[in-house]
Amino acid sequence: MKFLEFQAEVEEVLAGALHELGYKKAVADVDLPPNDSYGDLASAVPIRLAKETGKKPGDIAVEIGSKAMELAKKSKYVGAVVPHKGGYVNFSLSYPRFLVDSVASITASNDLGAVRERGEVVAIEHTNVNPNKALHIGHVRNLVLGDSLVRVMRYLGQQVQALNYVDDSGAQVADIVVGFRFLGFPDEAPPGVKYDVYCGDQVYTKVTKAYEQDPTLKAKQSLVLREIEKGEGEISEYTRKIVRRILAAQLSTCWRLGASYDLLNWESQIVHSGMWEKIFESLKKMKYVKFQTEGDNKGCWVIPDPDTGEEKVVVRSDGTAVYVAKDIPYAAWKVGVIGDPFGYEEYSKDQPGGVLYSTTMDGKKGKVRFGGADLAVSVIDTRQSYLQRIVAKVLEEFREGASRKYLHRSYEVVSLSKKTASQLGFEIEGEFAHMSGRKGLYVNADTVLDKLKERAKVETKKRNLSEAEGWVSDVAEAVAVAALRYELLKQDPDKMIVFDLDDALKFQGDTGPYLMYTYARARRILGKTEGKPRVDAGSAAKLTKPQERALGKKMSMLDISANDAGEFLSPKEVARYAHELAVAFNDFYESVPVNQEPDPELRDARLALVDASSRVLAEAMRLIGVPVRDRI
RNA sequence: GGGCCCGUAGCCCAGCACGGAUCAGGGCGUCAGCCUCCGAAGCUGAAGCGCGAAAGCUCAGAGACCGUGGGUUCGAAUCCCACCGGGCCCGCCA
């Protein structure tokens, strides 16, 4: 996109000016000025030069400015160069030309900033919901962060593997098997209740309660766990079936939210792959793991934590591996420090985003390959930061630099507001409560989506009285997804979200529906016009209103925010950009007539601006998984 | 005891990685407006006056000493240190 080209030109011009004036060591860096009246890009280099040269910042700005202006004559997009007495050199776009090229690249060449060349292989793991319950809003935060990152990385040209890890052999799965096999819960959910909701809301919470009342039941859990571990036998088969059923129900919610995956990684297969044994043997040879013969960890294999000087048990005294020891081989497989033991088969073709594969252990390799990525990103909440650091440290032992290729994208949890907790029947002490699957204190994703959809239906009907029910329902569903995804993405991952159900049911202001609405507004103009979107140097020169210039500039900056999103693993940058672009559009919309414009040339130029900016908006929305509709 | 994260208007958040320009940007809520004009899921506007030495108070009505205190710097919301408040992690659970 064009703004980065402009920036590159400015940097070149500035560097040239600095060089010619003898400021050899000065760095030619530019930034967006705080205010449009200062131009489109600015450099504070004179202020920094003032100190070492003893000259006044304003004088240096004048000196650099006039030299830069001279050099800028040959450039494509640099218009004016204006020194500021405070010690800044301000650069303005050569506007008509910039706009014409910008519109042309967006509409004619469909250049929305995506990098075309093949990038690195990036494995992104997200969602990872235990297959014993339905997704709650905390899981949705994970999914939205991960899925948006997948989209952004693909946009940036990376070859992404979207991975979803299924913990099919853990205690949480065992718990519901205990419920079905030993506590007599019916296999089938009551009519109208989704299977994963049934397992989570009814079976899991009640089994947890039953443990408290009858401690001997815990023995049943370990029995089930041992059976699952064996990988064969009736209980193991039964568990397999249950897990697949719950997973199918969970995936339908994930797909509903617009997420899709390339591969399912089963914990049971990682355990049975023998990868851990290999790694463990190597760690022993490297003397990285130690066998403790005394102390609290007597009889265990431990690894040292270099940060705290403490040690972490990886193999229990009974010889079984702990949780983190299952994560290590998975991580090693992702970044290719261990051979690939898996085959891959199609798991589902129903997925909206394309074929979903599953690992297999039957030795057949198939056509597709996974693992061995250049970069692995794990979207996991912040409570696991410590363990993720250990995993990275272990990888580093196998290959220098591996810990820089294995990144933990942590995020804070979603908790519930006092009010929402109280609506669920929980009276709490503070202002918010952490969710708990065991206690049944959570809000399911589908519940929220359904409520959002219900509201959206009312709003959509009001505006589209003659539309059929099916159309309204489709739009309402899209609005619901937009609202939820945007709500959970826009906030910084490091900040806890206190979720309030009533507050979430809003479609005004800085929300996903606002983006959808803005896009629909833009398409409406194009749908109603007698003109044709087109702009040339002559008509572009007529687009002099500040709202037109601001919109034209903003629409050329999607790739900047996407680059940031990729670099910092923070897709909210794109969400923020989408919102800014929408604001710029609405500002334009309110103050600049398009189809009412009597001058056809000017009208068409404005149409071109509307067309191009709405395409960019749609692309930004796509990157964060906010649905795009021509009308809502 | 050790470690990680958060603290910006009544409320919720941007800005912090790379320190810079006059008013530190949005949103929610509040008040007042705008649909004979391309979609109102939108947009526009919103602060002082009086009394008092002052804290403050009255009528009002929009809102911010960037948690506090030091330091670095020509310049700090941004970097460093300490402290305060909140959350989380440090298990032979996952």
Image (cartoon, grey):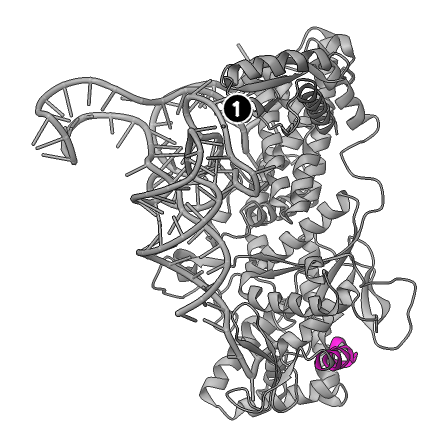
Residue A145 placement, left or right of A268: left
Magenta stretch secondary structure, dominant: helix
Report x, y in % for residue A561: 65, 37
| Residue under label 1 | A47
Q: Nearer the viewer, residue A243 or A384?
A: A384
> Is B68 rendered above or below residue A371?
above
Identified by mark 1, the residue type is Ile
Q: Can see residue A127?
A: yes
Among the 4 quarters of the image, the one containing residue A222: bottom right
Q: Can see residue A625?
A: no
Q: Residue at x 81, y 31 (%)?
A: A110
In which quadrant is the C terminus of chain A drawn?
A: top right
Q: How many marks?
A: 1
Q: Residue at x 78, y 20 (%)?
A: A101
In which quadrant is the N terminus of chain A drawn?
A: top right
> Dot 1 falls on which chain?
A
Report x, y in % for residue A444: 56, 61
Among the 4 quarters of the image, the one containing residue B53: top left
Among the 4 quarters of the image, the one containing residue A229: bottom right
Q: Residue at x 55, y 59 (%)?
A: A138
Magenta includes A359? Answer: no
Report x, y in % for residue A302: 61, 81
> Is A559 rendered above or below residue A325?
above
Task: Classify mark 1: residues with Cα within 10 Å, few (<14), some (14-19) or many (20+).
Answer: some
Span colored in magenta: A270-284
Q: Residue at x 74, y 9 (%)?
A: A539
